[in-house]
């Protein structure tokens, strides 16, 4: 009797497994790449003509129609799910699709306004102006620090070191509190910016790493090395939302140091061969601009540990950007403009 039960169970599993293989999602676009102006036209390929009771489609967590306009769906990489009910059985089928920006980014360049000395031993991770003082966060385990810097002379006139287990990352100042990320420490810190006194720590949630940080005057925005930027509650630093950073071709990863200026996010990207910044629309995640910073790295002392462009701060009174890099001997004050 037990053998028959076992054989029937195996037969049922085989039939159910075969049934699962008999359906698949059909998309009009074989590339699985769309823009918000497109309509997602869905169908199920029923390879053996099984009776279908019903089909439910979802994009992420939202139920959608078989002919779904993407105009109200956010940009990003999303999971498309089709749940097929056939002969009382339920089977799920999933595919990833990308909703891209509908326009290529505009190209920008820079003009150097001033060059200032910068500590070439500083592995720069974050820059921010606060009350006309430049704050800087540096990285590497055992060398990470938080500093106040006289940007005109490069003098570091106040500095604290992080515990050697932490790798310092991006910083931002909101509501008279300074926030600093760590890379893989799954932890950020809150400071009194006047005294550089640590007041509390806060854990990460779904974002497993800390890269760049900025704020819009209300919330914090945190990059984690992926194509996602997380929106953090200003009081608790809990992740309350996110945007996905998309070009007209793909998701853009390795987004590093962040700066909020006039409703846009300016960001460094962690690239070894190109000195590039980007301008992101924080409402949609679309990359609206690419800034060509090429040539800056060649103007600094070519030390053995010279690394990539990183660090971007906006001076609201001077209306200029300050940029540098990891172990760069100079801090550059620049103006950013559209390429002709």
Image (cartoon, helix red, strand yellow):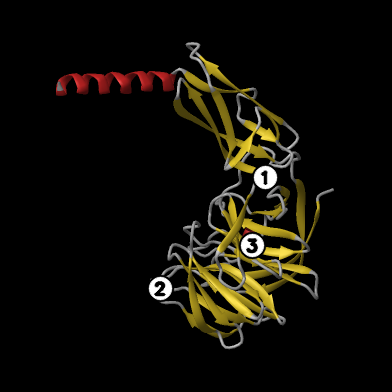
Q: Which mark is residue 246?
A: none
Dot 2 or dot 3: first in sequence order is 2
Determine contact: label 2, label 1, CB under 8 Å.
Answer: no
Element type where label 3 sits in the image: strand
Q: Quadrant of the N terminus?
A: top left
- Can you tell which of label 3 and label 1 is closer to the viewer? 1
Figure quadrant of residue 141: bottom left
Task: Please identify the quarter of the rendering in which residue 167 is found.
Answer: bottom left
When the figure is inspected, residue 193 is found, relative to residue 12, above or below; the finding is: below
Labels 2 and 3 touching (C-beta < 8 A): no
Q: Which residue is mark 3?
A: 258
For residue 312, say whether it is visible.
no
Q: Earlier in the sequence, mark 2 or mark 1?
A: 1
Q: Position of residue 325 (x, y in %)?
A: 59, 64
Q: Residues within 10 Å of mark 3 (few under 14, many from 20)?
A: many
Q: Quadrant of residue 132?
A: bottom right
Residue, disc 1: 74
Q: Give the CA distance from mark 3 to mark 1.
A: 21 Å
**What residue occupies the far top of the structure in this picture?**
48
Q: Earlier in the sequence, mark 3 or mark 1?
A: 1
- Tell me which residue sits at (51%, 74%) in the image: 189
The Cα–Cα distance between marks 2 and 3, rounded to whole angstroms, is: 24 Å
Closer to the camera, 153 or 136?
Answer: 136
Q: Read off the residue under disc 2.
A: 142
At horizontal 70% and vertical 53% (from top left) the residue drawn is: 280
- Marks 2, 1: nearer the viewer: 1
Q: Position of residue 41 (x, y in %)?
A: 66, 25
Q: Nearer the viewer, mark 2 or mark 3?
A: 3
- Provide the secondary structure element on which disc 1 rests: loop
Q: Position of residue 113 (x, y in %)?
A: 78, 68
Q: Residues within 10 Å of mark 1 (few under 14, many from 20)?
A: some
Give the alpha-carbon distance from disc 2 to disc 1, as whole Å. Answer: 40 Å
């Amino acid at each position: 009797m037990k053998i028959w039960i076992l054989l029937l169970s195996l037969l049922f599993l085989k039939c159910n497994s075969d049934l699962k293989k008999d359906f698949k999602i059909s998309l009009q676009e074989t590339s699985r790449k769309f823009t918000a102006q497109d309509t997602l036209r869905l169908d199920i390929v029923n390879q053996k003509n099984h009776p279908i009771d019903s089909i439910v489609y979802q994009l992420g967590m939202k139920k959608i129609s078989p002919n779904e306009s993407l105009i109200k769906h956010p940009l990003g990489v999303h999971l498309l799910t089709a749940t097929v009910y056939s002969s009382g059985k339920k089977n799920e089928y999933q595919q990833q699709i990308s909703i891209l920006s509908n326009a290529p980014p505009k190209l920008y360049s820079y003009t150097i306004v001033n060059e200032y000395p910068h500590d070439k031993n500083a592995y720069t991770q974050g820059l921010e102006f606060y009350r006309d003082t430049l704050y800087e966060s540096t990285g590497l385990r055992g060398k990470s620090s938080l500093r106040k810097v006289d940007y005109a002379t490069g003098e570091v006139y106040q500095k604290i070191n992080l515990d050697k287990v932490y790798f310092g990352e991006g910083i931002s100042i909101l509501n008279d509190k300074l926030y600093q990320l760590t890379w893989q420490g799954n932890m950020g810190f809150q400071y009194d910016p006047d005294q550089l006194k640590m007041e509390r720590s806060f854990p990460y949630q779904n974002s497993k790493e800390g890269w760049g940080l900025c704020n819009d005057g209300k919330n914090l925005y945190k990059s984690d090395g992926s194509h996602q930027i997380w929106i953090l509650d200003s009081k608790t630093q809990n992740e309350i939302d996110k945007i996905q950073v998309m070009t007209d071709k793909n998701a853009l990863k390795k987004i590093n140091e962040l700066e909020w200026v006039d409703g846009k996010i300016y960001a460094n990207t962690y690239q070894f061969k190109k000195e590039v910044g980007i301008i992101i629309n924080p409402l949609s995640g679309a990359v609206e601009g690419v800034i060509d910073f090429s040539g800056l790295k060649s103007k600094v002392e070519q030390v053995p540990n010279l690394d990539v462009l990183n660090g971007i701060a906006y001076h609201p009174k001077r209306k200029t950007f300050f940029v540098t890099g990891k172990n760069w001997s100079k801090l550059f004050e620049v103006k950013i403009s559209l390429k002709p």
